[in-house]
Amino acid sequence: MRGYAIGALRLLGFTNIADGTRWARDDFHNPLITWVSRCENSFSPGAGPASHSHPDLRSVRKIMANIITELLDQREIQKYLSGVARVGKDWVLDEIPTDAEGWIGAGDDGIAINEISSERCLIKYELWDGPPPALDTWDRTWSGSVHLTSGKIQAVDEYSGNASYGAEFDLGRENSVWQVRIHRKSLGHEEFTPNIISFTLLKLQFWLDH
């Protein structure tokens, strides 16, 4: 598995594997996180009279969302991802109307994701306590909302009339309207174009609008 990961990073142009790993963990590119960490070190308990919480740090924490839980579904989805739906929902996701670009559409208990042009997909789920920061390094982003009667969802892929299901992600709350942001990245490098590689990464972020 490690060999595949290193090979993928080299394909994307990273000769230094450490640099490639840092690139893959895009959350570490947020300079605000580094600044908060330095503030916490400067105003740690036992540091003297200034050890109380710094006012600037308190302000940052109020506006900075955090991940509550996350799941990387390691099952490679092949031909073809239809979307994500409530666990146990027996329906066809392509019945949900998509947006003007024909990519994504949300309905009760499901989100249709049209990835007919990608033969392989990997999905990561994230639950946040507020709107997550923007991810400018991804190719495409969709924002919307979805009502889920169950707090558990999973990916659905369909091909030739057969359906397969991904790992279950538990949002921890039933009968709620969730804000959703979906990011997409197609892997490719130089002459190894995305349509040749046909491998797509998707990151689904959920939070409640308080």
Image (cartoon, rainbow, N blue to C red):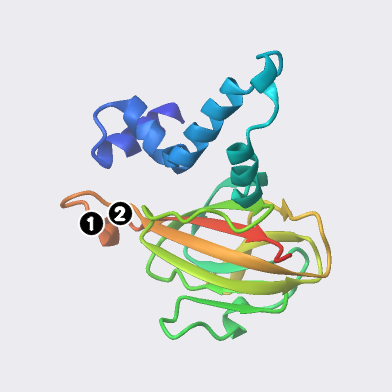
What amino acid is at disc 1? Thr
Circle 2: element type: helix
- Residue with the most extreme front position: 49
Q: Residue 197 carries which label?
A: 2
Residue 197: percent from left, percent from top: 30, 54
Q: Is 119 or 135 nearer to us in this picture? A: 135
Q: Distance between the residues labelled 1 and 2?
A: 6 Å
- Using residue 141 as the reference point, say whether residue 92 is left or right of it: right
- Answer with left or right where residue 87 lies relative to residue 40: right
Check contact, mark 1 vs mark 2: CB within 8 A. Answer: yes
Q: Is mark 1 on a helix, strand or loop?
A: loop
Q: Nearer the viewer, residue 83 or 37?
A: 37
Can you tell which quarter of the image residue 14 is in? top left
Residue under label 1, please give it: 193
Q: Which residue is drawn at 71% across and 18% down?
A: 45
Q: Label 1: how many residues lie within 10 Å, few (<14), some (14-19) or many (20+)?
A: few
Vertical relation: 2 (above or below) 87: above
> Looking at the image, which residue is at 40% across and 32% down?
21
Q: What residue type is labelled 2?
A: Ile
Rendering quarter of residue 196:
bottom left
- Asked if residue 134 lies left or right of residue 209, the reply is left
x%, y% of residue 53?
68, 31
Front residue (pair 74, 130): 130
Looking at the rendering, which quadrant does residue 88 occupy?
A: bottom right
Res. 25 visible in picture: no
How many numbered marks, from 0 up? 2
What is the crowding at mark 2: few (fewer than 14 residues within 10 Å), some, or many (at least 20)? some
| Residue in the picture at 28% in, 62% down | 195
Query: In terms of depth relative to the viewer, which is nearer, 181 or 37?
Result: 37
